[in-house]
Image (spheres, helix red, strand yellow):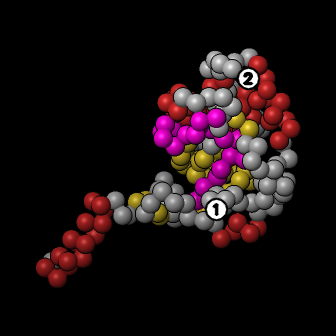
Amino acid sequence: MRRHLPFILILASLIICGCIQHEHYGQIKTHDESPQISPSAAKFEFGKRYEAVVVNVIDGDTIDVIVEEYRCRIRLLGIDCPETAPERNKPYEYDGITDLNYLAIWGIRAKEFARDLLLGRKVYLEFDEIAGLKGYYGRYLAYVYLENGTDFNAILIKKGLARVYVEGEFRKEEYYLKLEMQARKNEIGLWSCVIES
């Protein structure tokens, strides 16, 4: 027993510090929030839908999924939800809205909405040849579809929980802009804030 004591102490301290974390899926281990990038990523094809399970909701527009037995971080393509902390938002990023606390409230609502609809559920991912597989921060860019085929990215725009990310190019941009215009016109979600000219 004494000769195993150092090993037991090291193992116990790693578990206490949270350095070893077992996901619900036994083959996946991670020591931080960074996703384990799938070596099968090069096999992803444009226009094809991939079945995945959502294992973490980072915020309204970023999720972690298990796809083909690997954990990947997905940035919902073509949309941008407000950040959940005021200091991480920017004035005028959502048209004339300058109240960063207001944006943070909607960022929290977007995250809660995404968590309620997606966490632990099966979704389908589709990549866009125009946008490419990955974005600036190395996250995969994808349209996320619910099990019934509904475009979840579009739902966030319709509900006024996101704006269209016009800083990039993607196939559904025109469609998403129409949805955003409708949400703005009807003052839905974050667009219910009265903007004074």
Please give left or right for residue 177 compared with residue 165 in the image: right
**Residue at x 48% of width, y 57% of height:** 33
In the visual, does 77 lie left or right of 189?
right
Q: Position of residue 195 (x, y in %)?
A: 65, 20
Q: Residue furthest left?
A: 2
Amino acid type at image mark 1: Gly
Residue 141 as seen in the image, left or right of residue 56 = right
- Foreground residue among 161 and 46: 161
Number of marks drawn: 2
Image side of residue 149 versus residue 90, left or right? right
> Would you name the residue on which mark 2 appears?
184
Q: Quadrant of the C terminus?
A: top right
Instruction: List the single residue furthest toward the front.
Output: 197
Q: Which of the 4 quarters of the picture holds residue 22?
A: bottom left
Q: In which quadrant of the rendered image does the N terminus lie?
A: bottom left
Cβ atoms under marks 2 and 1 closer than 8 Å: no
Residue 164: name its quadrant.
top right
Label ID, residue 74: none
Q: Secondary structure at mark 2?
A: helix
Disc 1, SS: loop
Q: 63 above or below 68?
A: above
The amino acid sitting under disc 2 is Arg
| Residue 181 x, y percent position in the rendering | 79, 26
Q: Which residue is mark 1?
A: 138
Tell me the mark number nearer the camera, choosing from 2 and 1.
2
